[in-house]
Amino acid sequence: MDFIKGCNSKSDSTECETEEIGRREVRQVYLITYSQVDTSKFPTRESFAAAVVASFRSPSANVLHWCCSKGSHKSGGIHYHLSLKLNKSHRWLPAKNYLKEQYNISVHFSSVHANYFTAWKYVTKEDRDFIMSENHPDLWNSAGPLTMKAHLTKAKARRTRKAASLLGDTQGPPNNEETDKETVVRRGTGKKRLRAFDVAEICVSKCIKTRSDLLALAHEQKLEGRTDLAEFVINRSDKIVNTTITTAWEMENAIEEKKRSETSRLDLLRKAGENKCICNIENEWLKSAISLLEKNNISPDHFSHCVR
């Protein structure tokens, strides 16, 4: 197909890792590509996403969530990538026919390793201004680069350091390609796991302050195919998980707490007196305080003086 040839070409901006699916096959997750976009019909990502969602509307299947991005061809023109997840497995051919009949466009349907997270990551890697559906699952983790180019660069540097360490070379990385390959095989190429520091960063960025909140996020991501956070929680004891969350917020608030500890209580009171009372709603608090003092025959000025 022309689309596959275009994606495999070095002149294109993306690198396809999708699988062709037969006309009779059904999926719950799809990756949809519209190459060489007619901008008079779909000038924005939103317009294309709305058309695709409408193409799947039926009594038996509905779109749960989607993500759409835009990319440019070096040869000219733009293309859209859209990942979507349905509430149940459904054939893609009726949706393709709908778009052909309604808009006279041909889009490509493919499967990306069967889970939504992989399709979402494929869509978002080339476009910082991608859009997502309302109430889209939070699939962002602060650990690791999202772009494939950055990932490959880091992986190559890591393999070089491992090779130098095994060979005891202090002058620099080895130039022997065979030795480098042997090192990769010997040390393994397993996927990167989340560290406690990574999870601490996630807790702060997503305002997670309890283990239950972290479990909820891990479960939400696991349903979409992202399991690194769930693996961290399951493989660590409750004590380690709770300590990671607590330490993350202690570190986040450390500077503020340090400044506060270096300030005397009297200075804190004076500073508070310079600002408007935040607990005084429509003067109800002030009225209550003055009334309490008057009932005890205490002058408000005398009370303030005593406090100072």
Image (tube, rainbow, N blue to C red):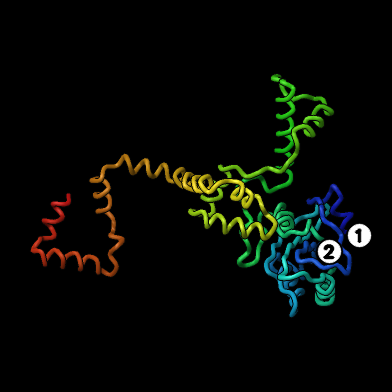
Q: Describe residue 5's horizontal placement relative to residue 265 as left or right.
A: right
Classify residue 144 by image quadrant: top right
In this orientation, does residue 254 appear?
Answer: yes
Q: Which residue is mark 1?
A: 1
Q: Describe residue 291's horizontal placement relative to residue 201 as left or right.
A: left
Residue 108 shows which numbered tag? 2
In this view, the residue farthest toward the right is: 1
Quadrant the N terminus occupies:
bottom right
Place of residue 92 in the rendered image (x, y in percent of width and height, measured from the top left): 82, 70
Whether residues under marks 2 and 1 lie with C-beta atoms below 8 angstroms apart, the answer is yes
Q: Amino acid at mark 1?
A: Met
In this view, the residue farthest toward the bottom is: 59
Q: Amino acid at mark 2?
A: His
- Identify the residue shown where x is 58% and y is 44%: 198
Q: Earlier in the sequence, mark 2 or mark 1?
A: 1
In this orientation, does residue 70 appear?
Answer: no
Place of residue 32 in the rendered image (x, y in percent of width and height, measured from the top left): 78, 63
- In the picture shown, does residue 289 fall above or below 56? above
| Count of all numbered marks drawn on residues in the image | 2
The front one of 266 and 51 is 266
- Identify the residue shown where x is 82% and y is 25%: 176
- Identify the residue shown where x is 81% and y is 60%: 111
The front one of 115 and 43 is 115
> What whole-number distance in Å separates the C-alpha atoms at marks 2 and 1?
10 Å
Tell me the crowding category of disc 1: few under 14, some 14 to 19, or many 20 or more residues within 10 angstroms, Cα based: few
Tell me the crowding category of disc 2: few under 14, some 14 to 19, or many 20 or more residues within 10 angstroms, Cα based: some
- SS at badge 2: strand
- In the picture shown, does residue 185 fall above or below 35? above
Classify residue 117 by image quadrant: bottom right
Q: Describe residue 304's horizontal placement relative to residue 39 as left or right.
A: left
